[in-house]
């Protein structure tokens, strides 16, 4: 009987690579004070310092996806941020389609956290 290849570790790594790339780029744009990030945070009614805090948090969250035993926590942390991003768009009166990228990332992050749920403590 031939051995079968287990695709799960490859899929897990690919998803973590995709997500960490997205959040590293997004965090970097906030830290670089890209014009569209500044205007978005102003439109949402947030202080400028908050944009930098979110950028740092996104970069730390992206890195945590690669720390053994903490990827699920990082995914949940970033998922919470994406929920906040989606709500920010809707509160600002943006069309619902503007919240779609955040909701897609939220879904992927929740899926990653679910598949790595064994990392979460049972306090």
Image: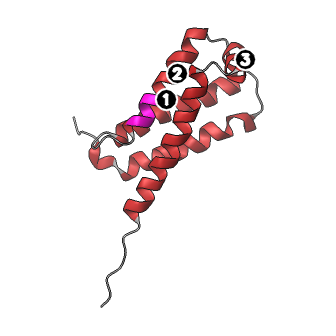
Query: Nearest the camera: 65 or 89?
Result: 65
Q: Which of the 4 quarters of the picture holds residue 30?
A: top right
Residue 54's label in the rendered image is 2
Looking at the image, do the residues carrying marks 1 and 2 touch, with CB atoms under 8 Å apart? Answer: yes
Q: Where 6 sits versus 36, above or below?
A: below
Residue 71 horizontal side relative to residue 55, left or right: left
Q: Which of the 4 quarters of the picture holds residue 107?
A: top right
Residue 83 in sight from this viewpoint:
no
Q: Crowding at label 3, few (<14), some or many (≥20) Cα neighbours within 10 Å?
A: few
Query: Nearest the camera: 87 or 65?
Result: 65
Magenta highlight: main SS? helix
Cα gap from disc 3 to disc 2, whole angstroms: 15 Å
Q: Which residue is mark 3?
A: 39
- Residue visible at 28% across and 49% down? 118
Q: Which of the 4 quarters of the picture holds residue 68?
A: top left
Residue 48 horizontal side relative to residue 11, left or right: right
Q: Between disc 3 and disc 2, whose residue precedes?
A: 3
Cα gap from disc 1 to disc 2, whole angstroms: 6 Å
Residue 98 in sight from this viewpoint:
yes
Q: Between disc 1 and disc 3, whose residue precedes?
A: 3
Q: Where 87 sits versus 70, above or below?
A: above
Judged from the image, the secondary structure of the residue bearing numbered disc 1 is helix
Cα gap from disc 1 to disc 3, whole angstroms: 19 Å
Is 89 magenta? The answer is no
Of all residues, the one furthest to the left in this rendering is: 123
Colouring chosen for the image of the structure: secondary structure
Q: State the quadrant of the C terminus.
A: top left
Q: Which residue is mark 1?
A: 58
Q: Crowding at label 1, few (<14), some or many (≥20) Cα neighbours within 10 Å?
A: many
């Amino acid at each position: 009987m031939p051995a079968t290849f287990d695709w799960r570790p490859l899929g897990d790594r690919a998803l973590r690579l995709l997500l960490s790339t997205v959040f590293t780029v997004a965090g970097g744009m906030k830290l670089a004070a890209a014009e569209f990030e500044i205007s978005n945070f102003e439109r949402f009614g947030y202080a400028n310092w908050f944009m930098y805090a979110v950028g740092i948090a996104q970069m730390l969250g992206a890195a945590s996806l690669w720390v053994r035993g903490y990827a699920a926590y990082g995914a949940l942390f970033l998922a919470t941020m994406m929920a906040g991003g989606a709500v920010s768009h809707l509160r600002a009166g943006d069309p619902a389609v503007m919240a779609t990228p955040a909701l897609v990332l939220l879904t992927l992050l929740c899926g990653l956290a679910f598949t790595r749920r064994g990392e979460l403590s049972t306090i």
